[in-house]
C-alpha cells in the first residue's frame, strides 16, 4: 500500500464492483437511448443522472459503519412497516389500490424499501440469537412474522411480485442462519400442495397472468401479448442482434413496456445473444461479489446480510429475465439498473451501499 | 417422541463454529444457485435467439410489415366480336379504419356532413364499428360520386381513420338481358372464406362470381392479387412504404355469344315469360341464351336491395330461373321433325300418305288431330302439324325406335357447358317406364310421346340443339367459350332423309303451314321451323288452354333454322303460357333472324313493340322496382306527407333515394340489410306441367 498517487479513500473503494455497476448502468442508458427511438429524452438522460446520484449515495452509505445498520435494522424495519400500513390505509380511503406515498419530491414505495428492511431485520434477529437456540421455535416464528406481515400487506396491495421478493429475502436469511433443511423442504411440499387454494385467492387479473404464462399463445393479442412480443423481440435478435437502433419490435411499439419491465427484450433485439450473455454474466459477477463479501464478513450480521442482499439483487434479475423470456408470469419486476424507473434502482443501490459498508468493515478488521 | 425433535433434528445444540460452517456451506449453495440460474437463463436465451431464431424473425417481420392486398382487376367477358358484356368501371368508396380513428364521434359527424349521410347510414356505420377491430376496414359507402369522393379525400388529414379509395365495380352494359347467361358477382360469403382461407376473399371490394359464367369462369377471370407492403407501428401508423407488387388482372373470356343478339332477344321477349336460344349451325357456338324476365346483374353486383330481392322472389314469371337451361316443357309438336327422321330411318316412305279425318282411333279411344287434313305425306304432315299422320306412323314403328333418334338429336341430354346447372328432362321409352313406374309401355304412350306430350320433357336449349343438328346434319355440341372445336361428326342419316324433314319445316313457314305469318321480311332469306303448343294441364270442360288464368294457358314453342338452303342459324323459342307456338314463339324467332340479317329493320319493329309494352326492359324493371318500393312502405310516405313539418333536408334526402332507385342505382341502406341472394331462397323450379290427358291439341 505504498501507492501515493491514489488517495487512500479512493483506493479503498471496491472498484471491481463499481466497474461492473458502471458497465450495467451505462449499457442500460445506451439501451434506453435506443428505446426512445435514438433520443436522450425521455429515458436515457434521466436514467444516467439517477444512476450517478444513487451510485454516489451507495458509496456514501459504504462509509457508514456496519454497526449502524445493525443497530438501525429493527427501528428501520418498524418505520417501513408503518409506512406500508399507511399506504394501505390511504389506498383504502381513496378507494383504489395504491402502492406509493407522495412525499412531494419523491413517490416513495414502502414495499420496495421493505425488501431491504426485511433482510436487515431478520439478519439482526439471528445475529442476536444465541447459537444454541437455532434449532428451536424461537429461531423460527419471529422471523416468519418479520417477513410474513409485510408479505401479506404487499399481497393486499396487490403486488404479488414484490410480496414474493420480500418473503424470499426473509427465507434466505433463515436458510443462511442454519434453520434445519427439513423445515424448508416440508414447507415447500405443503406450499406446493396448497398452490391451487392460493391460486383461487388471487385476483382475477393475477390468475389471468398465471394462466397466460402457462399458455401465452392462447391469447396472443390480449393479455398474452406482452410475453409473446417479448419472445419475438428476443428470438428475432439472433446471435448478434439486429444492430443498435435497428430493433423493429421496440421502435414500432410492438413490444410493450420496452423501456421498463421488458427492457431486456429491447436490448436483446438489437444486441442479440451476446448482449444478453453480457448482462447475465455481469449480474452473476455482482452476485458472486456479494457472496464473497459475505464469506469475508467478520460478524454474523454482516455475513447473513451480505449473502441475503446479494440474493435479493439476484432475485430481481432472475424474476425479470424469466418473465421476459416467457418462463415466469408477468409480475412487474424491473431489471435493476437497466430498466427505466427509480424505485428498483434505489432499492438495489441501498442494498449495494450496505454491502459495500460490510465489505469495508471486514477489510478494516482484517486488512488494515 | 418430542415433536420438536422431528422438526429440528436430533442434534439441537449448535455451537458458533458449527453455525459458521453451516453458513459457509449454505452460502456456497446459494452461489451455486446463482451460477446455475445464470446458466439456465443463458440457455433459455440461446434457445430463443438461436434455435428458434427463424420462427421469431418471421414473426417480427410480419409484425413490422402490413400486407395490404390489392384486389386484381377482374377479366372482361366479351362477345364473339370482342364487344364487352361484362367489364369493370372505376368507382369510389369510403371506409373507416377502426384502429386509426382517434375521435370516432367527431369524425363521424364531419363525415356525415361531407358525404351527406343519413342518420340511418351513420347508425349502421356505428354498429359495424362496434363489431370491427384493428385494421379491418368498415365500409361507409360504396359507389359514391366523384365530387363526394374528392370532398372526402381533401379532408383526410382532418379526419384520421377515414380511407377514401378507388376500386372497380363490375358493369354489364346490357343489364337484365345477360343476367342468366353471365350471372353476377358479389362479396365472398363466410363459407367461401372458411373453405379457402384466402385473405383475398375478405378484402373489401373484392367480388367473386356468384352465378352463370361469372361463377364458372372464376379461375380465368380472377387474376392474381397485388400486395402493398408498408412498415407500420403497433398502432397502425405508417412508417414507410416498402416494395409493392402490382396485381395481375384476370384474363378476358371470349364467348360465342353475339352481344347484340343477346340484348335484342332479351328486349324482344318483352312482357312474356320465356326463353330463346340461337346456335351457330356451322360450329355449335351459342349465339344467344336468353331467359326473361331476368334480374339486372348490375344491381346484384352492387348488393341487391331488400325490396328488389323480394320483388324478384314474388314474381310469378320467376325471374331468378334460367328457363333456357332449367325450364322443362313438354315439347309438343316441335319434336315431330325428330319423329319424322326416326320414321325415315325405319324405312317409312316419305311419300306414303295417311288419311287424316280429324283423329286417330286406338281401341275405343280417339286421339284427336287439330283439323281434318285429308291425305298427308311426311312433308305435308310436318307443314300442317298433322297428329293423325304421326300417330299412325309412330305406332307402326313404335316409340322405342323414335326415342333413340330424339336422344341423338339432343333431347334428354346434358351438354358440356360452363353453366352452374342444367336440367335434362325426359325422353321416355319402355325400359324407362318399366324402371320408373314398373308398368308396360302402352300404345297410347307411343301416341302421346310421338307428338311431344305425355312423359316427354325438354329444355329450350335441347330443342335448339335438335334443330341445329337437323339443319346442319352434324352432331353439333353447343358451347359458349370461343375457341377452336374439333369438327362435329355427321348424323347417321342420308342427305335425302334430312332434306325431307327440312322441306317439311320450310313449308311450315313458307308453304301453307302453321307459321306462315312469321315469314322473314327479308329478300331471298327464308326461315324453316316447326311450331309446338304444349298443354299445361288436362283439358277440362270448355277451357282448352287457350284462355283463362295465365298460369294454365298452353306453352308456345318454336324450333327453327335459317336460311333454309344453307342453314347458318338454328334455335328454339319457348314462351310460357303463350297459348301457341305460331302465335307467341314464332314471331320472336322471326325477329331474331331479322336482327341477324337486318338489325335496323328489327330494331324498328322492336321499338314499335316496346312503345306498346311501356318502354324497354331496363325502364320497365326500374319502374316496377320503384312501384314496389312505394308499395312496401306506404305508411312512411303518407306520414311524411301528412306531418309536413319534417325538415326540408329530410324530405330532400328521401326523394334523392327515390331518384337513385329510379335510375337503377344501388341504395346502400337496403344493400346493407339485404339477404345473401344465394342463401335467401332457392329459386323455384320450373312449373312442371301436370301429366296431360290422352289426346292432345295440335
Image (spheres, coloured by chain):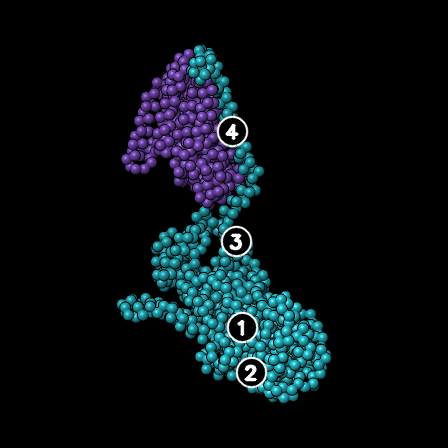
Please report the residue visible at 45 percent of the width from the left and 73 percent of the height from the top: B621
Q: How far apart are marks 4 and 3 (CA)?
A: 47 Å
Please report the residue visible at 45 percent of the width from the left and 28 percent of the height from the top: A193
Question: Which sits in the foreground, B197 or B683?
Answer: B683
Mark sitting on residue B194: 3
- Which comes sooner in the sequence, label 3 or label 1? 3
Q: Do the residues labelled 3 and 1 touch (CB within 8 Å)?
A: no
- Which comes sooner in the sequence, label 2 or label 3? 3
Chain of the residue that carries numbered disc 2 in the rendered image = B
Please report the residue visible at 53 percent of the width from the left and 29 percent of the height from the top: B39
Q: How far apart are marks 2 and 3 (CA)?
A: 52 Å
- For the colour purple, the matching chain is A
- Which comes sooner in the sequence, label 2 or label 1? 2
Q: Callout 2: few (<14), some (14-19), or many (20+) C-alpha neighbours within 10 Å?
A: many
Q: Callout 3: few (<14), some (14-19), or many (20+) C-alpha neighbours within 10 Å?
A: few
Q: Name the residue under label 1.
A: B689
Mark sitting on residue B38: 4
For mark 1, give the secondary structure. loop
Q: Which of marks 2 and 3 is in front?
A: 2
Mark sitting on residue B582: 2
Per the rendering, the colour in which chain B appears is cyan
Q: Which of marks 3 and 1 is in front?
A: 1
Chain of the residue that carries numbered disc 3 in the rendered image = B
* Percent coordinates x, y for residue B565 in the rendering: 66, 83
Quadrant (top left/top right/bottom left/bottom right) for the N terminus of chain B = top left
Tell me, yes or no, whether dots 2 and 4 are on the same chain: yes
Amino acid at each position: 500500500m505504498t501507492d501515493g498517487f491514489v488517495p487512500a479513500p479512493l483506493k479503498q473503494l471496491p472498484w471491481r464492483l463499481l466497474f461492473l455497476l458502471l458497465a450495467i448502468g451505462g449499457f442500460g442508458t445506451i439501451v434506453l437511448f435506443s428505446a426512445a427511438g435514438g433520443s436522450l429524452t425521455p429515458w436515457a438522460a434521466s436514467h444516467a443522472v439517477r444512476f450517478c446520484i444513487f451510485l454516489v449515495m451507495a458509496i456514501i452509505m459504504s462509509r457508514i459503519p456496519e454497526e449502524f445498520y445493525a443497530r438501525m435494522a429493527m427501528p428501520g424495519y418498524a418505520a417501513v412497516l408503518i409506512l406500508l400500513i399507511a399506504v394501505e390505509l390511504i389506498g383504502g380511503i381513496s378507494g383504489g389500490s395504491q402502492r406509493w406515498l407522495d412525499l412531494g419530491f419523491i413517490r416513495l414505495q414502502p414495499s420496495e424499501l421493505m425488501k431491504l428492511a426485511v433482510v436487515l431485520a431478520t439478519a439482526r434477529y439471528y445475529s442476536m440469537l444465541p447459537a444454541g437456540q437455532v434449532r428451536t421455535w424461537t429461531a423460527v416464528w419471529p422471523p416468519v412474522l418479520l417477513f410474513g406481515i409485510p408479505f401479506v400487506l404487499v399481497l393486499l396491495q396487490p403486488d404479488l411480485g414484490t410480496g414474493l421478493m420480500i418473503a424470499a429475502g426473509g427465507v434466505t436469511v433463515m436458510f443462511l442462519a442454519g434453520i434445519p433443511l427439513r423445515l424448508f423442504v416440508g414447507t415447500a411440499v405443503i406450499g406446493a400442495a396448497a398452490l391451487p387454494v392460493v391460486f383461487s385467492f388471487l385476483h382475477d387479473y393475477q390468475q389471468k397472468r398465471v394462466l397466460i404464462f402457462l399458455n401465452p399463445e392462447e391469447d396472443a393479442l390480449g393479455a398474452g401479448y406482452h410475453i409473446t412480443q417479448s419472445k419475438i423481440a428476443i428470438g428475432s435478435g439472433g446471435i448478434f442482434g439486429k444492430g443498435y437502433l435497428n430493433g423493429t419490435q421496440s421502435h414500432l411499439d410492438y413490444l410493450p413496456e420496452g423501456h421498463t419491465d421488458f427492457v431486456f427484450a429491447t436490448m436483446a433485439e438489437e444486441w442479440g445473444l451476446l448482449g444478453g450473455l453480457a448482462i447475465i454474466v455481469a449480474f452473476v459477477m455482482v452476485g458472486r461479489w456479494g457472496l464473497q463479501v459475505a464469506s469475508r464478513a467478520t460478524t454474523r450480521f454482516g455475513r447473513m446480510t451480505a449473502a441475503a442482499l446479494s440474493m435479493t439483487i439476484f432475485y430481481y434479475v432472475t424474476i425479470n429475465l424469466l418473465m421476459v423470456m416467457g418462463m415466469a408470469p408477468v409480475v412487474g419486476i424491473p431489471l435493476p439498473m437497466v430498466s427505466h424507473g427509480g424505485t428498483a434502482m434505489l432499492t438495489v443501490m441501498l442494498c449495494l451501499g450496505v454491502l459495500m459498508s460490510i465489505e469495508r468493515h471486514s477489510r478494516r478488521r482484517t486488512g488494515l | 417422541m418430542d415433536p420438536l425433535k422431528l422438526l429440528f433434528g436430533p442434534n439441537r445444540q449448535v455451537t458458533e463454529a458449527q453455525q459458521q460452517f453451516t453458513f459457509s456451506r449454505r452460502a456456497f449453495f446459494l452461489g451455486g444457485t446463482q451460477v446455475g440460474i445464470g446458466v439456465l437463463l443463458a440457455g433459455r436465451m440461446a434457445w430463443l435467439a438461436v434455435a428458434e431464431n427463424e420462427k421469431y424473425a418471421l414473426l417480427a417481420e410480419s409484425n413490422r410489415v402490413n400486407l395490404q392486398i390489392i384486389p386484381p382487376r377482374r377479366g372482361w367477358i366479351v362477345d364473339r366480336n370482342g364487344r364487352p358484356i361484362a367489364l369493370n368501371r372505376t368507382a369510389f368508396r369510403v371506409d373507416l379504419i377502426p384502429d386509426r380513428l382517434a375521435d370516432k364521434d367527431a369524425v363521424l359527424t364531419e363525415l356525415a356532413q361531407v358525404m351527406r349521410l343519413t342518420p340511418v347510414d351513420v347508425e349502421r356505420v356505428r354498429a359495424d364499428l362496434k363489431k370491427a377491430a384493428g385494421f379491418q376496414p368498415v365500409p361507409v359507402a360504396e359507389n359514391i360520386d366523384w365530387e363526394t369522393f374528392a370532398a372526402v379525400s381533401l379532408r383526410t388529414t382532418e379526419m384520421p381513420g377515414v380511407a377514401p379509395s378507388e376500386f372497380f365495380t363490375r358493369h354489364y352494359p346490357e343489364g337484365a338481358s345477360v343476367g342468366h347467361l353471365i350471372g353476377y358477382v358479389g362479396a365472398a360469403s363466410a363459407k367461401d372464406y372458411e373453405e379457402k382461407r384466402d385473405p383475398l376473399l375478405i378484402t373489401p371490394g373484392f367480388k367473386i362470381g356468384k352465378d352463370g359464367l361469372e361463377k364458372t369462369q372464376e379461375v380465368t377471370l380472377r387474376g392474381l392479387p397485388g400486395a402493398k407492403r408498408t412498415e407500420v407501428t403497433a398502432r397502425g401508423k405508417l412508417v414507410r412504404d416498402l416494395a409493392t407488387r402490382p396485381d395481375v388482372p384476370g384474363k378476358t373470356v371470349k364467348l360465342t355469344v353475339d352481344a347484340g343478339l343477346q340484348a335484342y332477344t332479351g328486349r324482344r321477349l318483352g312482357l312474356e315469360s320465356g326463353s330463346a336460344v340461337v346456335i351457330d349451325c356451322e360450329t355449335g357456338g351459342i349465339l344467344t341464351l336468353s331467359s326473361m324476365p331476368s334480374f339486372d346483374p348490375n344491381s346484384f353486383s352492387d348488393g341487391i336491395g331488400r325490396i328488389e330481392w323480394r320483388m324478384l322472389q314474388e314474381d310469378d314469371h320467376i325471374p331468378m330461373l334460367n328457363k333456357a337451361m332449367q325450364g322443362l316443357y313438354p315439347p309438343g309438336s316441335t319434336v315431330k321433325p325428330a319423329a319424322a327422321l326416326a320414321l325415315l330411318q325405319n324405312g317409312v316412305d316419305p311419300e306414303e300418305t295417311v288419311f287424316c279425318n280429324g283423329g286417330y282411333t286406338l281401341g275405343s279411344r280417339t286421339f284427336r288431330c287439330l283439323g281434318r287434313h285429308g291425305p298427308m305425306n311426311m312433308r305435308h304432315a310436318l307443314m300442317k302439324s298433322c297428329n293423325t299422320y304421326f300417330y299412325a306412323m309412330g305406332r307402326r314403328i313404335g316409340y322405342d325406335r323414335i326415342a333413340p333418334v330424339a336422344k341423338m338429336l339432343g333431347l334428354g341430354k346434358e351438354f358440356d357447358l360452363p353453366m352452374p346447372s342444367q336440367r335434362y328432362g325426359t325422353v321416355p321409352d319402355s325400359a324407362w317406364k318399366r324402371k320408373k313406374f314398373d308398368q308396360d309401355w302402352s300404345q297410347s304412350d307411343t301416341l302421346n310421346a310421338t307428338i311431344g306430350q305425355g312423359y316427354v320433357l325438354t329444355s329450350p336449349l335441347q330443342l335448339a340443339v335438335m334443330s341445329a343438328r337437323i339443319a346442319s346434319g352434324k352432331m353439333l355440341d353447343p358451347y359458349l367459350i370461343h375457341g377452336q372445336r374439333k369438327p362435329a361428326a355427321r348424323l347417321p342419316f342420308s342427305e335425302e332423309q334430312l332434306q325431307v324433314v327440312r322441306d317439311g319445316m320450310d313449308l311450315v313457314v313458307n308453304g301453307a303451314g302453321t307459321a306462315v305469318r312469321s315469314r322473314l321480311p327479308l329478300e331471298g332469306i327464308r326461315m324453316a321451323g316447326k311450331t309446338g303448343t304444349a298443354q299445361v294441364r288436362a283439358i277440362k270442360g270448355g277451357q282448352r288452354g287457350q284462355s283463362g288464368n295465365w298460369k294454365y294457358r298452353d306453352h308456345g314453342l318454336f324450333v327453327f333454322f335459317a336460311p333454309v338452303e344453307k342453314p347458318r342459324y338454328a334455335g328454339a323459342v319457348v314462351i310460357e303460357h303463350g297459348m301457341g307456338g305460331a302465335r307467341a314463339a314464332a314471331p320472336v324467332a322471326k325477329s331474331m333472324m331479322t336482327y341477324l340479317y337486318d338489325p335496323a329493320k328489327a330494331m324498328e319493329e322492336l321499338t314499335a313493340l316496346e312503345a306498346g309494352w311501356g318502354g324497354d326492359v331496363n325502364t320497365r324493371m326500374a319502374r316496377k322496382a320503384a312501384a314496389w318500393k312505394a308499395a312496401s312502405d306506404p305508411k312512411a310516405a303518407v306520414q311524411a306527407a301528412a306531418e309536413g313539418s319534417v325538415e326540408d333536408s329530410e324530405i330532400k334526402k328521401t326523394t334523392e333515394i327515390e331518384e337513385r332507385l329510379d335510375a337503377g342505382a344501388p341504395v346502400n341502406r337496403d344493400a346493407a340489410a339485404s339477404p345473401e341472394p344465394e342463401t335467401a331462397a332457392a329459386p323455384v323450379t320450373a312449373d312442371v306441367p301436370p301429366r296431360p290427358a290422352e289426346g292432345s291439341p295440335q
